[in-house]
Amino acid sequence: MRRLAMQRPVFDYVDGELAVGGLSVSKIAGEIPPPFYLYDVDALRQRFVELKEAFSGSSVLHCVALKANCQPALLRPLEALGAG
């Protein structure tokens, strides 16, 4: 079985400030009125690709639950990678 490399955390501290994808959460919060959801689409893509690779020897369709999250900004990148 192939072991996956450790991934960088999606949420991390950069120069003492909480960050997502290397971007300061406090800066984003200053530009977007709360409440809001904050995602790292690059991390989402990377995790999905790793999931597909882990099952590459199998004939499976990786599906995304729309009820759990129906944000087009999250679904389009996954669809482009072959999610159902």
Image: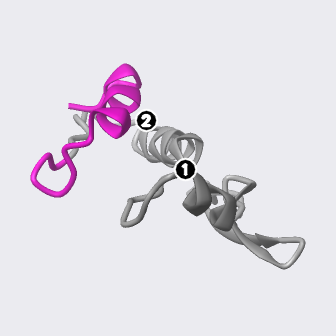
In the image, 52 versus 29, the foreground residue is 29
Q: Is residue 12 left or right of residue 73?
A: right
Look at the picture and state if 73 lies above or below 44: above
Q: Residue at x 84, y 79 (%)?
A: 16
Residue closest to the far top: 80
Residue 69, horizontal then vertical, whole percent: 22, 52
Q: Quadrant of the N terminus?
A: bottom right
Q: Which mark is residue 40?
A: 1
Q: How many marks?
A: 2
Mark 2 secondary-structure assignment: loop
Look at the picture and state if 83 lies above or below 25: above
For the residue marked with disc 1, what is the amino acid? Asp
For the residue marked with disc 2, what is the amino acid? Ser
CA distance separating discs 2 and 1: 24 Å
Residue 75, horizontal then vertical, whole percent: 30, 35
Residue closest to the far bottom: 16
Q: Which mark is residue 28?
A: none
Q: Residue at x 49, y 53 (%)?
A: 32
Q: Earlier in the sequence, mark 2 or mark 1?
A: 1
Which residue is the site of mark 2? 56
In the image, 43 versus 53, the foreground residue is 43
Magenta region: which residues? 65-84
Mark 1 secondary-structure assignment: loop
In the image, 51 versus 11, the foreground residue is 11
Look at the picture and state if 13 lies above or below 74: below
Q: Is residue 79 left or right of residue 5?
A: left
Q: Residue at x 54, y 50 (%)?
A: 40
Give the label, 2 or 1, closer to the camera: 1
Look at the image and say whether residue 53 sits in the magenta stretch.
Answer: no
Residue 44, horizontal then vertical, whole percent: 48, 47
Residue 28, horizontal then vertical, whole percent: 60, 56
